[in-house]
């Protein structure tokens, strides 16, 4: 895959993302497509990625699903890279790119079949973000949100992940990892307390070499 030259303000982010997370994005896309049958979605269905960065997860998913894609990131330089990547992947014609905060994004209620995000939620007002996720999902829709690298890692990639974790500590790379536990527990509680009785079929907190929420909206309101 071709890597485009990033804006000066994004060079360090892109260097780290491409070196350490690129294979993880592929893992997440492949596993999500398999687990949630994304190949069976129609061209009228929508997949949304927020905090999309260069849009790599959506690019990989576009090869596995015929759905339309919605990209959200508040950084317009990131969105421009995503646009170039989408054009390179020949998916720009079935994509909508939004430059805004996920908490403030205007997405129609009950309009998205699948929502994915990796490494972003801890940087947001996560309760508001999770509330939006529940609102945007179609009945029966699924969200897959967290900070893991995928379930099945090759030995080579696991070594790469460990290398990144050591580098993060040494160089004080801020991934807001101190918020992971808060997001996992308080985010889970927020979903259960506010939506489980009538809007959600289930909420799972998974360990995919880092936590992920799997959230499924009920097919119809629970009575």
Image: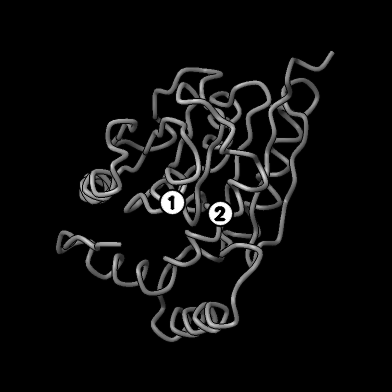
Q: Residues within 10 Å of mark 1 (few under 14, many from 20)?
A: some
Task: Tell me the colour scheme of the image.
Answer: one colour
Please tell me which residue is depicted at 63% across the width and 35% down the height of the picture: 142
Kindly state the secondary structure of the residue where label 2 is placed.
helix
Query: x, y percentage for residue 116?
Result: 52, 44
Locate residue 191 relative to residue 75 in the image: left or right.
right
Mark 2 near mark 1, Cβ–Cβ under 8 Å? yes
Kindly state the secondary structure of the residue where label 1 is placed.
helix
Q: Residues within 10 Å of mark 2 (few under 14, many from 20)?
A: some
Q: Residue furthest right?
A: 223
Please tell me which residue is depicted at 56% across the width and 64% down the height of the picture: 149
Q: Is residue 156 above or below residue 113?
A: below
Please tell me which residue is depicted at 37% across the width and 66% down the height of the picture: 17
Q: According to the image, label 2 marks what residue?
A: 30
Disc 2/disc 1 C-alpha distance (Å): 8 Å
Locate residue 22 relative to residue 33 in the image: left or right.
left
Q: Earlier in the sequence, mark 2 or mark 1?
A: 2
Query: x, y percentage for residue 180?
Result: 60, 59
Query: x, y percentage for residue 86?
Result: 29, 44
Say the numbered circle drawn on residue 10. Answer: none
Q: Is residue 81 above or below residue 217?
A: below
Say the numbered circle drawn on residue 60. Answer: 1
Q: In the rendered image, which quarter contains the N terminus?
A: bottom left
Q: Quadrant of residue 15?
A: bottom left
Q: Is residue 83 above or below residue 142?
A: below
Nearest the camera: 117 or 186? 117
Q: In the rendered image, which quarter contains the C terminus?
A: top right
Please tell me which residue is depicted at 59% across the width and 32% down the height of the picture: 40
Q: How many numbered discs?
A: 2
Query: x, y percentage for residue 82?
Result: 28, 48
Q: Quadrant of residue 211?
A: bottom right
Nearest the camera: 197 or 221? 221
């Amino acid at each position: 895959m071709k890597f485009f030259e990033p804006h000066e303000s994004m060079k360090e982010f892109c260097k780290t993302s491409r070196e350490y997370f690129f294979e993880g994005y592929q893992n997440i896309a492949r596993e999500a497509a398999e687990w949630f049958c994304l190949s069976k979605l129609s061209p009228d269905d929508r997949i949304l990625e927020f905090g999309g960065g260069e849009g790599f997860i959506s690019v990989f998913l576009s090869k596995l699903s015929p759905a339309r894609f919605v990209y959200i990131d508040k950084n317009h330089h990131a969105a421009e890279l995503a646009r170039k990547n989408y054009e390179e992947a020949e998916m720009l014609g079935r994509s909508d790119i939004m430059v805004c905060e996920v908490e403030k994004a205007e997405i129609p209620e009950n309009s998205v079949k699948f929502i994915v995000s990796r490494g972003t939620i801890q940087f947001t007002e996560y309760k508001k973000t999770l509330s939006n996720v529940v609102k945007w999902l179609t009945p029966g829709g699924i969200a897959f949100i967290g900070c893991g690298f995928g379930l099945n890692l090759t030995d080579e990639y696991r070594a790469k992940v460990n290398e990144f974790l050591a580098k993060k500590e040494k160089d004080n790379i801020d991934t807001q990892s101190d918020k992971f536990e808060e997001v996992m527990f308080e985010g889970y509680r927020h979903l259960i307390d506010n939506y489980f009785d009538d809007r959600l079929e289930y909420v799972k907190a998974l360990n995919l070499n880092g936590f992920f929420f799997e959230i499924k909206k009920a097919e119809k309101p629970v009575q």
